[in-house]
Image: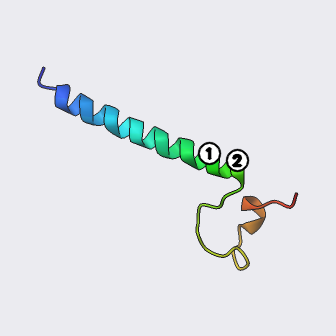
Amino acid sequence: MEYIPSIIICVILVAVVALIIRKMIKDKKKGKSGCGCGCDACAMKGNCHPKQ
């Protein structure tokens, strides 16, 4: 019984992380970028936004 508050907090944290990951996956499938900056000077622009 003394671990119930810790277990509840862990469950909440896992749920929040799962929701964040889910949103990131949905955004990636829609082609949205996660960085929020321009891609012209980014060295990784080919990986984030491959030519279609």
Residue at the spot of label 2: 29
Q: Amino acid at mark 2?
A: Lys
Image height of 42 relative to 3, above or below = below
Task: Find residue 13 and report its horizontal and vertical position in percent.
Answer: 34, 40
Task: Find residue 15 and report its horizontal and vertical position in percent.
Answer: 40, 36
Q: Is residue 52 left or right of residue 36?
A: right
Would you identify the image quadrant in which residue 49 lies?
bottom right
Image height of 39 relative to 33, above or below = below
Would you identify the image quadrant in which residue 11 lies?
top left
Q: For marks 2 and 1, give the CA distance.
A: 6 Å
Q: Please tell me whether mark 2 sits on a helix, a strand or a loop.
A: helix
Task: Find residue 12 and report its horizontal and vertical position in percent.
Answer: 32, 36
Residue drawn at 67 percent across, 58 percent down = 32
Q: Please tell me whether mark 1 sits on a helix, a strand or a loop.
A: helix
**Dots 2 and 1: beta carbons under 8 Å?**
yes
Residue drawn at 55 percent across, 41 percent down = 22
Q: Tell me the quadrant of the picture where the N terminus can be found.
A: top left
Image height of 48 relative to 18, above or below = below
Would you identify the image quadrant in which residue 34 lies?
bottom right
Residue drawn at 63 percent across, 45 percent down = 26
Q: Is residue 36 left or right of residue 1?
A: right
Residue at the spot of label 1: 25
Q: Is residue 51 left or right of residue 35?
A: right
